[in-house]
Amino acid sequence: MDRNIKVTRDSPTWLVYLQLATFATYLYGLSAALPLLRAELGVSQAVAGLHGTGMALGGIAGGLALPALTRRFGRRVVTWAGLTGMNAGVLLVAFGHALPFTLTGFTLAGCCGSTALYVMMAVLSDHHGPAGAAVISEANAVAVTAGIATTYAFSVVAESSAGWRPALFVPVASTLLLALLMGRVWVPPVPAPPPSSSSPGRAGGSGGRVPYGWRFHVAGVVLLCCVALEFAFNLWAAELLSQRTGLSPGVAATGLTAMLAGMAAGRFGGARLALRFAPGSVLLGSLGVALAGWALFWTGTSAPVCYAGLALSGLGISVQFPLGLTRMIDVSGGRPDQASGTASIWAGVGSGSGPFVLGALGDGFGTHTAFLLAPALIVMAAGGAAASRTRS
C-alpha cells in the first residue's frame, strides 16, 4: 500500500530528536557497562540481569504515573524533569561501587528516562499526525546514532587507564548542553477536540471511557516481545561475543556498536518505508530480518561473522519499537498519553524480563543456549502482529 505521506521537520521536532539522543547515551552507556560492572562486582549473570530488571520496574512505575504527571505538570516539564532524574541515576552508577547503589541507579534512571521517552513519543505522534510512525522511527534513528558514538567511546575508555566509569558522564554533559542551547523551544500543544457523545474515547456522552479493543492488548504483547528481544541483545550480546570469539569484555563491547549501526540504518530506512507502506507489513518484515541476524550471530565463532550477525540483527530490531509503539497509539481511540503510559508498562515488562530470563538461562545452560530465547520472542511477536493486522 503506497501512502506517500510527507514529513516536516521544524525546530520543536529537532528538539525532541536531540532529547532522544541524550536518552540514548544513557541507555546504551549503561548497557555497555553491564558486563564490566558484573566483572567488577563479581556477581552471576542472573544477579547482573537484575540491573535490567530494575530499569524495567522503574519504567513500569513511570508508565503508571505518566498520565497523571502530564495532566498535572504538562509534557514539557515532565520531559525535562525525566531527563534530569535519568542523569541522577547515571551519576549514582558512576560513583557507586556496590550492588545496592548500582541497582538503585539503574532503577532511577529507568523510571525517569522512560517517563521522558514516552512523553516524547506521544508529542511526536500528535505533532506529525499521519506521519507519526515515520517520524518516531526517524527520531529513534537519531537516538541510535548517538548510541553508536556512546558505545564506541565506551569501549575506548574502558580499555584505557581511566576505566569505564568516566564514559557515563556523556549523558549528563549532553543533557546540560541541550538545555542551554534549546531549553526555550517546545512543541505547540494540539488543541483538544470539543467534548461530545461521538468523541473518540467517550462512551455515549456518559463521560466513561470506551475500553481498549483486543488489538490494543495484542499490540502490547507484540511490543513486549520486541523490547525483550532488543534488551536481551543490548545487555548480553557482548557477553556471548566475548565467549564465542575470545575477545576481552572491553573489546567485545564494540559488538553493541555493530548492532547499533544496523539499528541506525534500519530506522532511517524504516522511516521511509513507513511513509509508503502499512506499518504492520514493515514490522513483520523486520522480524524476519532479525531472525536471520540472530542465526548468523548465534552460529558464528569468528569476530567478523558475529559482527555481521549483530549488525543484521540490529537492522531487523531497528523499527520494532517505534512501529510497535505507534501501533498502540493508533488503536488507542485517540488517547496518546494514556496509550504511551500503557506502552511503557508493556515495554518495561519486556525490558526487565528479557535480560533477566536470558541471564538466568545463561547461568543454568550457558549464554549460547540461552540465546535461543531470541527466536522464541521473534515468533511470538510475528504471530501477534499478523493476527492483529488491519488494512490501514
Image: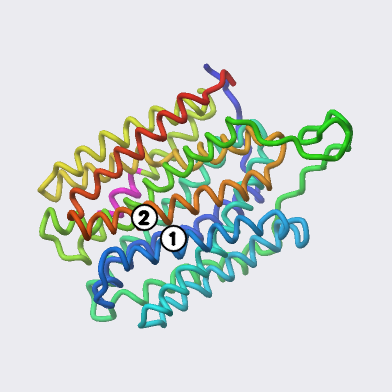
- Residue 27 — which label? 1
Magenta highlight on residue 364 = no
Q: Position of residue 18 (x, y in %)?
A: 55, 56
Residue 169 quadrant: bottom left
Amino acid of disc 2:
Ile
Q: Position of residue 116 (x, y in %)?
A: 60, 58
Amino acid of disc 1:
Leu
Q: Residues within 10 Å of mark 2 (few under 14, many from 20)?
A: many
Mark 1–mark 2 Cα distance, whole angstroms, equals 11 Å
Q: Is residue 306 above or below residue 201?
A: below
Residue drawn at (50%, 23%), measured in percent from left and top?
277
Residue drawn at (46%, 30%), measured in percent from left and top?
384
Magenta highlight on residue 256 = yes
Could you say which is closer to the camera, residue 97 or residue 58? 58
Residue drawn at (58%, 61%), measured in percent from left and top?
61
Could you say which is closer to the camera, residue 189 or residue 90? 90
Q: Identify the residue position indicated by label 2 in the image.
A: 148
Residue 47 quadrant: bottom left
Could you say which is closer to the camera, residue 291 or residue 27? 291
Query: In the current view of this chain or complex, which residue is farthest to the front?
Result: 364
Q: Position of residue 60 (x, y in %)?
A: 55, 57
User: Considering the numbered disc 2 on the image, is that residue within a helix, a strand or a loop?
Assistant: helix
In this picture, which residue range is highlighted in magenta?
Answer: 255-262
